[in-house]
Image (spheres, rainbow, N blue to C red):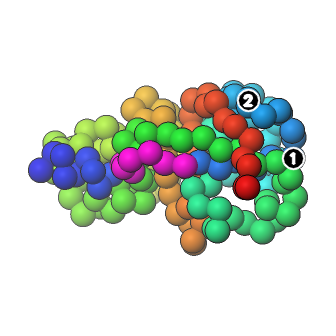
Amino acid sequence: MKNKLNESTTLSGSVNLYHFTREDMGKQTTLDPQETVKKRSSYSWNEYKRSKFPRVFYYTDLTKVEDQIKSSSHILYTTKVDGSKILMLNEALAIYKKNKNEMEKTDKKAYDVIHALVGGGQTSDWDAMFEAAAKNYVGIFYDTGNLPMVNIFIPLKVTEYDAS
C-alpha cells in the first residue's frame, strides 16, 4: 500500500518547469527562492499575501498560462525536476480528508505537510504547510482552475527557453 499511496501524492518522471520573467538573466541562470522574494512581481502579490515563504513559481504546461503573465513577461526559462520530489497538494489533501489516520501510517511526509496546512481544521496555515513541505520535498504542485503550478523551494538552474 505504501508505494501506491506515495505514487498518488507525488508527480512521476521528469517534470518540465517553465518560469516567466521580465528580467533577462542570460542564457543560463539560477532561480533562488531567497532572491525572488525580493524581486516579486505584481502578479505574485496575492500568493505572497497567503504566505511569505520563499518559493519560485513555475508552470508545467505552456498551453495553460495566465494571459497577463504571458503578455507582460518577455523571457521564459525552463528546467526539469524529478517528479517524485514534488508533492501533489490537491491529491494529498484529498487523501488526508478521506483517511488521515491511514495516510499518517503510509505516507508520513505528505501527511505532515497537509496536517500543517489544515491542523485544527478551522483555518489554513500556509506558512506551516510550506515549512513542512520544504523539509520533505523540493516543491509542491497544485492546480487552481486549469492553471497547473509548481512552487519550488530550492535554487534551480534554468535555461532560457528556445521555442524553435
Which disc, if any, is residue 40? none
Q: Amino acid at mark 2?
A: Thr
Quarter occupied by the C terminus: bottom right
As measured in the structure, the alpha-carbon distance from the residue carrying label 1 to the one carrying label 2 is 14 Å
Q: Is residue 34 visible?
A: yes
Residue under circle 2? Answer: 29
The reply to whether residue 125 is in sight is no
Q: Is residue 51 magenta?
A: no
Residue 31, position as x, y percentages in the image: 69, 32
**Residue at the disc numbered 1:** 22
Q: Are marks 1 and 2 in contact (CB under 8 Å)?
A: no
Which of the 4 image quadrants contains residue 112?
top left
State how many labels appear. Answer: 2
Mark 1 lies on a secondary structure that is loop
**Residue 148 spot, x, y in % from top left:** 56, 61
Residue ID at (49%, 48%): 15
> Residue 20, how many percent across, how many down?
75, 50
Span highlighted in magenta in the image: 10-16
Q: Is residue 12 magenta?
A: yes
